[in-house]
Image: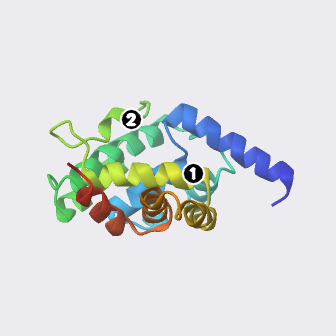
Amino acid sequence: MDAAQQEATARARELQRSWYGEPLGALFRRLIDDLGLNQARLASVLGLSAPMLSQLMSGQRAKIGNPAVVQRVQALQELSSQVADGSVSAAEAAERMEEVKKSSGGSVLNSTQTTASSGAPTVRRVVREIQSLLRSVAGAGDIIDAAGTLAPTHPELAEFLRVYGAGRTAEAVAHYEAHQS
């Protein structure tokens, strides 16, 4: 990717952040993970072509042009939160995804729907947000390098960077739970 393409991609991701609250790549990866989907299935449920989903995720395209697709993203965000907090089973989520696929209409993304039904964010959701933020700033290799630099003087901070910036979500959830007072 040349410098102009990198700049265009960075600009698209910033636009996505301002329009949707975060880059679509992070949002879609979270939906894929939480709902047990692959990219092709997510594209199908949203009513997008697989190449369009890929372009949105990579920042080659900034905006979801179809309001019905935006509404479906919002519905999947809510469903994802319910699956993450355990209030919806995987089987029920699969049924609801079929309903989402058939839905139409217009809406804007609602970032307040990333909480559990109690109003408190789930541990997994908090961890995924921390991971997403760190990974939007730097790649895993750079985060590991930074952790190595900090380790001699700030070992706890170095561990945090390694676990959340380059580790698996399950490892980060365990770390989060171990460090709550």
Residue at x 32%, y 51% (from the top left corner): 125
Placement of 128 over or under 107, stated as above or below: below
| SS at mark 2 in the image | helix
Counting from the top left corner in percent of width and height, residue 165 is at 49, 60
Residue at the spot of label 2: 111
Going by the image, does 85 lie left or right of 6?
left
Counting from the top left corner in percent of width and height, residue 153 is at 52, 58
Going by the image, does 149 lie left or right of 116?
right
Q: Residues within 10 Å of mark 2 (few under 14, many from 20)?
A: few
The kind of residue tagged 1 is Ser
> Mark 2 or mark 1: which comes first in sequence?
2
Residue at x 42%, y 34% (from the top left corner): 109
Residue at the spot of label 1: 136
Q: Splitting the image into 4 quarters, where does residue 52 fall?
A: bottom right
Placement of 115 over or under 88, stated as above or below: above
Counting from the top left corner in percent of width and height, residue 53 is at 56, 55
Going by the image, does 13 lie left or right of 180?
right
The kind of residue tagged 2 is Ser
The N terminus is located in which quarter?
Answer: bottom right
Residue at x 66%, y 47% (from the top left corner): 61
